[in-house]
Image (spheres, helix red, strand yellow):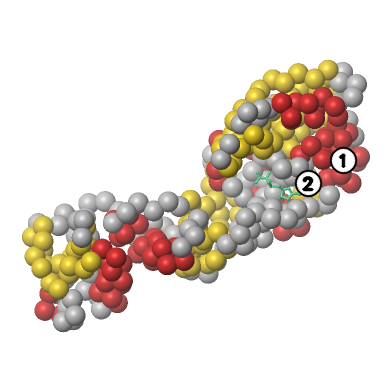
Amino acid sequence: MERPCVRAPRDEGEETRQALAAANLVDEEYDIVADEESVFVPVTDPDAVPGEFEVVTRDVPTRTRQRTPADVLGFEPSYERLGDIVILDENDPDRAADIADAVMASDLPVDTVVNRASKVKGELRVRDWDVLAGDGTETVHREYGFEYLLDISTVYFSPRLATERRRVTEQAEPGDHAFDMFAGVGPFVVPFAARGADAVGVDLNEAAVEYLRENARRNGVEENVTAVHGDVREVAPEYEGWADRVVMNLPHSADDFLDSAVTLAGDDCVLHYYDIQHEDDPFGPGERAVRDAADGYDVTVETERVVRSYAPHELNVCLDVRLSR
Ligand SMILES: C[S@@+](CC[C@H](N)C(=O)[O-])C[C@H]1O[C@@H](n2cnc3c(N)ncnc32)[C@H](O)[C@@H]1O
C-alpha cells in the first residue's frame, strides 16, 4: 500500500527510525522496508516530520508478522537467545550497538542485549559481558521442557549444548546413580533426576550450586538431587564406587579429573567424557587417557560423537565409555 515514508541512507536507517520513534511518528501498522541504498520508515503524519528528513511515498506492506531485528536493520544479524537475553559476538562496538538497538526495537520478547567481552576464563568458565541494552543478566532459560534460572555474569551456561545434554540424559534409567562432576546450574542433573535417577551435581562455583538447588526445586525434582559446592577431587572419595553414570563436561581439562571419575565409578559405569581435540584425531587422545586411568576395568568406547566445531580444525567431542569389572 502507498504510504508516506521517511527515506534515509541505509547506514542511517536505525538512527532515523529512533528519531522518528522518539517523536511518535513511526507508523507501526506498516513494515519498514529497504532497498540497496535506502531505508523507508512509514510515518503516521508526514506534516509533522522534521524538515531535516526527506518524506516520500512508497509501497510498504501491512505488518502481518512480528518485526524482527533484520526488518529494522536491513540485514540479518547473528545472535543467540538465552531466556530473555540476546547474546552478540561482535568485535565492532558500533555494529554491536546498532544490533542491540534493533533487537530492542523488534518484537522479540527481550529484556537485555549483551556482547561477549572476553572468552570463558578461569576455573569457573565465566565470561565478561558488555551490557548494551537493559540491565539484568539473570534470566530463565527453557530447554526441552525444563526451566533454568541463571545469571550469565556469575555462571557458565551454553544453550548450544541442549541437544547433546538431551542425548546423554535420555540414557538414564529410574534408580540410576548419575554423577555430574562439573554440574553448573544443573542442565544434566535436573533431567537425570526427572527420569527417576538419583542425581548428584558438584561445582566449584558457589553461585552455580545455588542456582542448581533452585532449578531442582523449580522443576520439581529436588528429592532426587544432591547439590554439592566444592572441588570434585575432594568430593569424589565420599562417593567412591557409587556411580552408574558420570558426566565430565570440562572439555579443556577433563583428563586431569579422570582419577576422580574412576574413584566414583561403580562396577559398571558409563563415563560421558568431553574433550576438545584436533580434527585429525578427535577421539584418540580421550580414549587413551580413559584407558590409562581405568586400571582394573574393561574399557569399551560405546559412542564417539562430534558435539560441535570449537575453532578452526578443533572439535568439541564426547566419548561415552563403559567401564566394567
Ligand atoms: C563447562 S562448565 C559446564 C557446566 C554444566 N555441565 C553445563 O553444561 O552447563 C564447567 C563447570 O565446571 C566447574 N568446575 C571447574 N573446576 C571444577 C572442579 N575442580 N570441581 C568442580 N567443579 C568445577 C565450573 O565452575 C563450571 O561451572
Picture coordinates of residue 44, whole percent (x, y): 16, 71
Picture coordinates of residue 269, whole percent (x, y): 79, 25
What label does residue 236 carry, if any?
1
Picture coordinates of residue 219, whole percent (x, y): 62, 46
Determine which quarter of the picture holds residue 194.
Answer: top right
Residue 99 relative to residue 249: left or right: left
Amino acid at pointer 2: Val
Q: Element under label 1?
A: helix
Label 1 neighbourhood size at 10 Å, few (<14), some (14-19), many (20+)? many
Image quadrant where one finds the N terminus:
bottom left
Q: Residue at x 63, y 28 (%)?
A: 280
Image quadrant where one finds the C terminus:
top right
- Answer whether residue 110 is visible to the viewer in this image: yes
Q: Residue at x 56, y 40 (%)?
A: 312
Label 2 neighbourhood size at 10 Å, few (<14), some (14-19), many (20+)? many
Q: Is mark 2 within 8 Å of ligand 1?
A: yes
Mark found first going from the N terminus, 1 or 2: 2
Amino acid at pointer 1: Ala
- Answer whether residue 244 is visible to the viewer in this image: no
Residue 143 relative to residue 97: left or right: right
Spatial CA distance of label 1 from label 2 is: 9 Å
The residue that label 2 is drawn on is 202
Q: Residue at x 78, y 26 (%)?
A: 288
Picture coordinates of residue 310, whole percent (x, y): 59, 41
What label does residue 97 carry, if any?
none
